[in-house]
Image: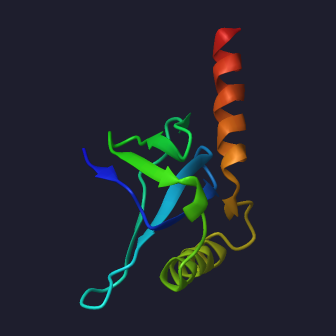
Amino acid sequence: MSDYSPDVWHIIKIKAPGHDLYYRVLAGWYGGYTGSDSWKISSGIHGVIDKGTYWEMPQSSGSVYYCYKETERHSMLTQMTFQRYRNQFETEFDGQEWTFEIVPIQDVIDFFKSESSENDL
């Protein structure tokens, strides 16, 4: 289990044929003068907790992403990474129904609210 605090981030909504819908964090870090930029796609969001200036998002792996609200955006590297994965989905699932898109954090919040109300029934 690890904790991550990315420099930039977005939420990706993913639904592949034959699989459940899930949300992941596409996170990016700037490498600075002597390092390289890097990215990571999270294992799957299991909740969203509003901590004021940032969102705390536990993952299916046990890791936690701390995503500052003002840094929800792309870097050039995360944009290229997103597009590469989206193109793979398009090729692999051609002619089938699939989803691989960037969504606002509110979509994830609404998803977990509706999931918890269904479980309360």
- Residue drawn at 44 percent across, 71 percent down: 28
When the figure is inspected, residue 15 is found, relative to residue 48, above or below; the finding is: below
Q: Of 66 and 85, which appears nearest the observer?
A: 66
Residue furthest to the top in view is 121
**Which quarter of the rendering shows the N terminus?**
top left
The correct choice, above or below, for 74 with respect to 19 in the image is: below
Give percent across and percent down for residue 6. 42, 62
| 72 is higher (above) or lower (below) than 74 | above
Among all residues in the image, which is located at the extreme bottom? 33
| Residue in the image at 72% along x and 45% along y | 107
Looking at the picture, how far across and down is residue 105, in whole percent?
Answer: 66, 49
Q: Is residue 61 visible?
A: yes
Left or right placement of residue 64 versus residue 110 in this view: left
**Visual colour scheme:** rainbow
For the point 58% across and 47% down, the residue is 22
- Residue 110 is situated, as x and y percent measured from the top left of the image, at 72, 36
Q: Is residue 11 above or below residue 75?
A: above
Query: For the C terminus, which image quadrant?
Result: top right
Compared across the picture, whether 34 is left or right of 38 comes to left
Please count the marks in the image: 0
Quarter of image, res 88: bottom right
Residue 88 left/right relative to 5: right
| Residue at figure coordinates x 30%, y 91% from the top left | 33
Residue 16 visible in the current orientation? no
Residue 117 spot, x, y in % from top left: 70, 18
